[in-house]
Structures are given as C-alpha cells and as structure tokens.
Amino acid sequence: MRTYGDTCPIAAQAAQGALSLVRISGGGSLELLAKVFSRPKALLDAPGNTIVHGWIVDSAPIDEVLVSIYRAPHSYTGEDSADISCHGGIAPAKTVLELLRKAGLSDALPGEFTFRAFMNGKIDLTRSESVMELVSSGTREGLERAIKRLSGALEKEILAIRDKLLEAVSVTELYLDYPEDEIDSAEEGTALFSCRQAAEDALQMLKKLSASYRRERLYQEGALAVIAGRPNAGKSSLFNALLNEDRSIVTEIPGTTRDWIEGSIALEGIPLRLADTAGLRSVSGADEAESRGIERSRNLAEEADIILYTVDGNEGLSEEDKVFLEKHNKKVILLWNKSDLKEPPEYIRKNFAPVNKNRPLLVVLSAKTGEGIPALCASVTSLLTVRDPYVLESMCGLGTQRQKDLTEKAAFLLEDAFFKADNEQPLDVTALLLREALNTIGEITGEVSSADILETMFSRFCLGK
Ligand SMILES: Nc1nc2c(ncn2[C@@H]2O[C@H](COP(=O)(O)OP(=O)(O)OP(=O)(O)O)[C@@H](O)[C@H]2O)c(=O)[nH]1
Ligand SMILES: [Mg+2]
C-alpha cells in the first residue's frame, strides 16, 4: 500500500465544474503523461510555467486539453508537475485519470500534493494547514485570515518566538557544558538573566497567540445565535427579518413555533447560525408538542454562543424574563421588540444601560418595521468579538486546534521552567524544559515532526490538494 512520503509520480482530480482539473506531480510524471498525449515532444520540450495544447489519446482521442507545465523546483509541490484542464462533467476527468493510471501514475492520497510541498520545503505546516482553511472559509473575512497564514504571517510569528527561545536554550546549554571551575559567576548571572528575559518574552508571545485562537475560530466556524423569549414576543418575525426571507411561520397566536428552525447569515464576516425557537412558557399551559419544543429551546439556549432574548414591548418584562436573563446574563442581548407599538420605559433603559457591565445589552427594535436591526447586528458582533487584552489587531492568529495545543504546551513548559528556576532547581532541569519548549514550537511549523503526526494531519485534506 502507498504511504505519504513515497515520491512516485501521482495523479488526482483537483476540481470539477464547467472544466475539470487533473493534477499530476513527481519525477517522471511528465514523461508518463507524454505517453498518452497527442504532442509528446511539445510537452516534453515545454519549459516550466507554459501551457501546451493537445489531446489525451488512447486508441482514439479522449479529450481536448490544455496542460500547464511546472518544472521542479518551481511548482506547488517542488517537483515536476502539471495541471491538465479537461472538459467538465464526470466522464472526461475520470477517463483521463484511468489512462494516466494505465500509463504508470499512482492515485494521489488526500492532501498528498500539499504534503510533498511541505516535504520539499516549499511551505511550513502552518501554511499547509491554511490551505484547508481556505477551502472551508465561509466568508471573505475568514478567507482573508486564512490567506494571511498562507502567506506565512503565522510562520513568521512562530519563528520569532523560536529565535527568542533559541537564545535562552543556547545560553543555558552553554553553561551546562562548561566545567564549573572555569565559570565566572558574575558573568554567568548576567547571561542567565538575559536568557530569562528572552524566555519571558517568548512566553508572552505564546500567550498572545493562544488567546488569538478564539477569534480566528469565530471567523472560520462561526457562532450559534439562538432567538429565545416568551410566546408571541416576535421571535419568528425577527428570525425572518434577519434572514431577509419568509422562513418561519408568524401568527398572532402564542405557541406558533413548535420545533426550532435554523438559518445562516454572516455578520461583518462572522458566519452565524441563527435559530428560532419555541416560546418559553410554563409547560403546564402547553400541549405535548409545544412542551417538547420548549425543552429543546432551553437546551439550545445552553449551547448558544449568544442568545437574542426577545421581549414583547407591549407586555414589558415579566418575572420569567428576569429569571432567564439572570441565568444567562453574560451571553444575552435583551431585545425590546415591537418598539413601533411601545418604547421601553425609562427604568428599563437605565437598568440595561451599557454602563451596567453585569447586565445584558439592551437593543430596542421592531421586527415589523426593521428599526433597530442594524443596532442589533452591531451588538451581536461586538459581543462575539469582545476584545481580549492579549490579542493585538495586527497579529496573525492561530488557525487550528493543533497549533493551539502546541502553543499552550510550549507556554506550560516555559512556566514550569521558570517555577523550577525560582525554586533553586539545578540548571540542567530548567535547560531540559526550555529545550522541550523549543521542540514543541518546532512542531508547529513542522521543523520538528514525526511521520505519524504528518500522516494524520494530511489525511484530513481533500483529494487533489
Ligand atoms: N407591531 C408589531 N408586531 C409584531 C412585531 N414583531 C412581531 N409582531 C407580531 O407579533 C405576533 C407574534 O409574532 P411571532 O413572530 O409569531 O412571535 P413568536 O415569538 O415567534 O411567537 P411563538 O412562535 O408563538 O413563540 C405576530 O402577530 C406578529 O405580526 C413588531 O415588531 N411590531
Ligand atoms: Mg415563533
């Protein structure tokens, strides 16, 4: 069975639409392609970064194609490779692939092209991972953040941390190697002080990076916003207004929505899953279907990243509302709906004024007229992207859980090293921890890596990437 790390010529379909793309790579791959190409000499003589027109041929012509030629090392994988643009649909690419297989090319494994790019030093692991992030980005902001990582911004930040740690490791290891009687203790003190400084800097940088992950995930994966509130508050009307379509049934009868409905929107680049739920009221007044719906609403509110708690302005705030708000406080925005009928009284505005940091934000709106909806959108984004003092806007954040786990592991090792140093443990104990932290940082970019970790990582990629 083939594994990652083989260098044989490979092929895979990389795209399908009006045109299909079949990608090949590896030493000898162009020669194998030439065997099934109508103009083998033109193909083999073509310099890198040129396009050759011709036909894929078997006993009869199979498809008219354009072949983009790349010559090692100036290609995505760093090997000789080509992209074959075939006609779209299923049959052309499938038949071309079958012929290439017959000619001697092997089927590529998922992510194998990117794996080869990594192995050939074209990109580090953070950039490889960003390739998959790009593919799954749902909004332009998500895409731009992944592109930043693809262009190497995260790699640069990790390398800056590595350099700081390298400085610390080299000093500690130097003193470990020195015969004790040759050490000038004043000099050693100064050197170890600057080593500590460098390692402290590295720790601060690691903490900032680790804190950045939440925000980056938000733009990639989005958040769940649940619209909750008592029956008839106008939840479904708001859901429809935010989605800009007539999705959820609206009537004047309380208890209209039974099961929850989900829709997707994007708010300032954050993908948002929006859920309309059954109105919350004491289960004794509800039939079986409604009470099950109410239970689901409560469960969904627990899961939510943010709750848009809707109140019928005509009715005002009830005891039930107050209990709910108290319970979910931190992730709630209080929506005073039907403002076209009744504005909130002064005491409500005062109680929920933005200065009351431990109270939910108040937004006054009318799902009917649309007034206040832009303010709601702004409040949702500001609650979701609440500023973390550690995260700098200019920073390129972490893109994957793997990167986050390693960043936290390295930070933990450094903190442990400082603790041991402060508690008079010998230098060799601290040095070992610093070295381990350095290796952990190396794992983020792939400078330090093991075959099984790489295989697990790249096997999650799609075919042809
Ligand atoms: N005047 C006015 N009426 C509204 C507004 N929002 C909703 N309504 C009306 O209030 C009633 C209830 O609206 P829904 O959107 O069905 O309320 P709901 O919270 O989904 O109700 P349940 O599904 O029963 O829990 C309907 O008659 C709506 O037309 C608003 O902003 N202004
Ligand atoms: Mg409803």
Image (cartoon, grey):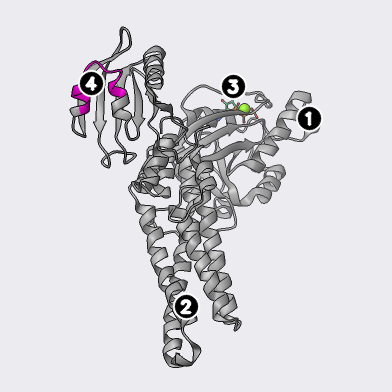
Mark 2 vs mark 1: which is more N-terminal? 2
- The residue carrying mark 3 is 249
The residue at label 2 has a CB less than 8 Å from ligand 1: no
Q: Earlier in the sequence, mark 4 or mark 3?
A: 4
Residue 186 spot, x, y in % from top left: 44, 92
Q: Is residue 113 left or right of residue 226?
A: left
Relative vertical location of residue 431 with respect to residue 205 in this rendering, above or below: below
- Residue neighbourhood size for the residue with mark 1, other residues' Cα within 10 Å, grouped as few (<14), some (14–19), many (≥20): few
Q: Is residue 245 above or below residue 439?
A: above
Distance Cα–Cα, label 4 vs label 1: 79 Å
Q: In the rendered view, does 279 fall on the left or right side of 421? A: right
Which residue does the numbered mark 1 point to in the structure image?
Answer: 285
Kindly indicate whether the residue at mark 3 contacts the one at mark 1 (C-beta within 8 angstroms). Answer: no
Q: Is mark 3 within 8 Å of ligand 2?
A: yes
Q: Amino acid at mark 1?
A: Gly
User: Residue 177 at what x, y percent from top left?
Assistant: 47, 80
Residue 259 vertical position relative to residue 372 in the rendered view, above or below: above
Measured Cα–Cα span from mark 4 to mark 2: 60 Å
| Cα–Cα span, label 2 and label 1 | 72 Å
* Residue at 56 percent of width and 73 percent of height: 417
Tag nearer the camera, 4 or 3: 4
Q: Please report contact status of discs 4 and 1: CB closer than 8 Å, yes or no.
A: no
Residue that sits furthest to the top in the current view: 60
- Residue 368: x and y in percent read 50, 29
Tell me the mark number nearer the camera, choosing from 4 and 2.
4
Q: Tag 4's secondary structure?
A: helix
Q: Quadrant of ligand 2?
A: top right
Task: Choose between 174 and 206: the one closer to the eye.
Answer: 174
Please tell me which of labels 1 and 3 falls first in the chain.
3
Real-space Cα distance between discs 4 and 3?
64 Å
Q: Mark 4 — residue?
A: 40
